Amino acid sequence: MSWFPARAVVDLAAVRSNVESLAAHAPTAQVMAVVKADAYGHGLVPSARAALAGGATWLGTAQIAEAIALRAAGITAPRVLTWLHAPGAPFEDALAADVDVSVSAAWSLEAVVAAARATGRTARVHLKVDTGLGRNGLQPDELARLLPAVLRAQAEGAIEVVGLWSHLAFADEPAHPTVLAQADVFAAALATVEAAGVRLEVRHLANSAATLTAPQVHYDLVRPGIAVYGLSPVPQVGGPDEFGLVPAMTLEASLATVKRVPAGHGVSYAHQYVTTRDTVLGDVPLGYADGLPRHASGGPGHPGGPVRVGGRTLRVAGRVCMDQFMLDLGPDATERAGDRVELFGTGADGGPTAQDWADAAGTIAYEIVTRLGASVPREHVHAEALEPAGAGDVR
Ligand SMILES: *Cc1c(COP(=O)(O)O)cnc(C)c1O
């Protein structure tokens, strides 16, 4: 029994068309749809299938377990890369599942080689170079020092280096000088690796923001994540529609209770909100345990997260609690328990978006969708989008 009074409706046709838009922005590159973190909260396998139908030829995950889950679900054709490993990572399982792995430290080269020897498989490896983000990846001088060991492992047949890759620090600020500075460091690393005789299949650097705004760094493969789900990686530059994207997730709930209260009534913990007139309160059965940000609470001087109710947009009244929050529906409200409210969606009808919740909570839309709890059922619609557009046509 898994009935729940709220649901996240995920439009697979939107995911498919978003990938088509991304591919059009990067016509000279292949598209790796990044499906880490349960496809940014949208459901790993259905989202991956929709992205493939939209033209993605690669899938990317941070964790090995998600890459293996894709294969276990029967997603066998596309290449899958997984990149965030710590000692003890199950590289043997990754190789057995025909998954490409990333090497971003000497220890992981050793571990991947050991897994290749143990399984008798050749590991397809993407060398990760830190071109300036200051996060995961080999420093350029470390990469140069590791190359002899890389070449030995390749000569032995334990690994095949298929990719060199990196990640940008300021892609969400398209004019930021570090974008092209990182590209320069990347070019130097490419030259080093290729001079050593490595023949790379794919060079990749671009996330969603760079896919949409920095064609100079598309190389052979782009790695969009957030844009696959229809959210803008650069909200200060433009919303989804400006990039041909449609938000794929709509979060909706059923009102649990609706009741009339007098003026001066405190609402929710610590009475951060107090009614100013006789009014009607609605109780929305979603809270921070379900992933809503408590920072989207509403009170004086701080508008809470927006909610669409019967054609009007209201704001969270008072504190967001663990499992619920309140709305002041107004004195003339006609809503009843069970009525649907929408926390965020496409925004097409002027309704609230995940970006609006991010703004209300002082965060980014990524956090709003990825932190939506496993408690909230995902309902996938437009499953016909799992077929490639025009499937059945002669092409
Ligand atoms: C998450 C991630 C991406 C996708 O980033 P978006 O900003 O969501 O497009 C690409 N590459 C790496 C290494 C990542 O960690």
Image: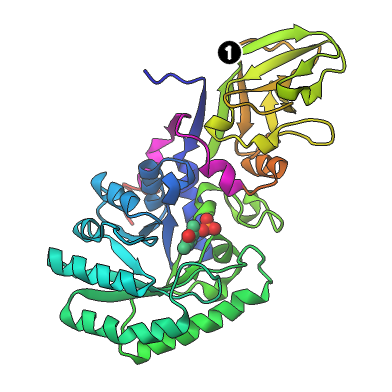
- Mark yes or no: residue 233 visible: yes
Q: How many marks?
A: 1
Q: Which quarter of the rendered picture does the N terminus lie within?
A: top left
Q: Quadrant of the C terminus?
A: bottom left
Q: Is residue 175 above or below residue 3?
A: below
Of 359 and 104, which appears nearest the observer?
Answer: 104
Q: Percent position (x, y) of residue 263? A: 86, 12
Q: Residues within 10 Å of mark 1 (few under 14, many from 20)?
A: some
Disc 1 secondary structure class: loop
* 131 sits left or right of 298 in the view: left
What is the quadrant of residue 47 in the picture?
top left
Q: Does residue 328 lie above or below 141 as drawn?
A: above
> How far across and how far down the image is residue 355, in percent?
65, 44
Left or right of residue 162, residue 32 in this image: right
**Residue 144 location (% of width, % of height):** 39, 86
Vertical order, 141 against 219 (above or below): below
Colour treatment of the image: rainbow
Q: Name which residue lies at 44% across and 75% down.
A: 129
Quickly name the residue at label 1.
338
Place residue 277 in its image quadrant: top right
Q: Is residue 157 left or right of residue 124?
A: left
| Span colored in magenta | 365-387
Residue at the (26%, 72%) spot, across then down: 110
Q: Is residue 223 visible?
A: no
19 displayed left or right of 169: left
For residue 2: magenta?
no
Q: Tag 1: residue type?
A: Gly
The reply to whether the residue tagged 1 has its Cβ within 8 angstroms of ligand 1 is no
x and y, in percent, of residue 78 in the image: 30, 58
Q: At x 28% / y 81%, what residue is drawn?
A: 150
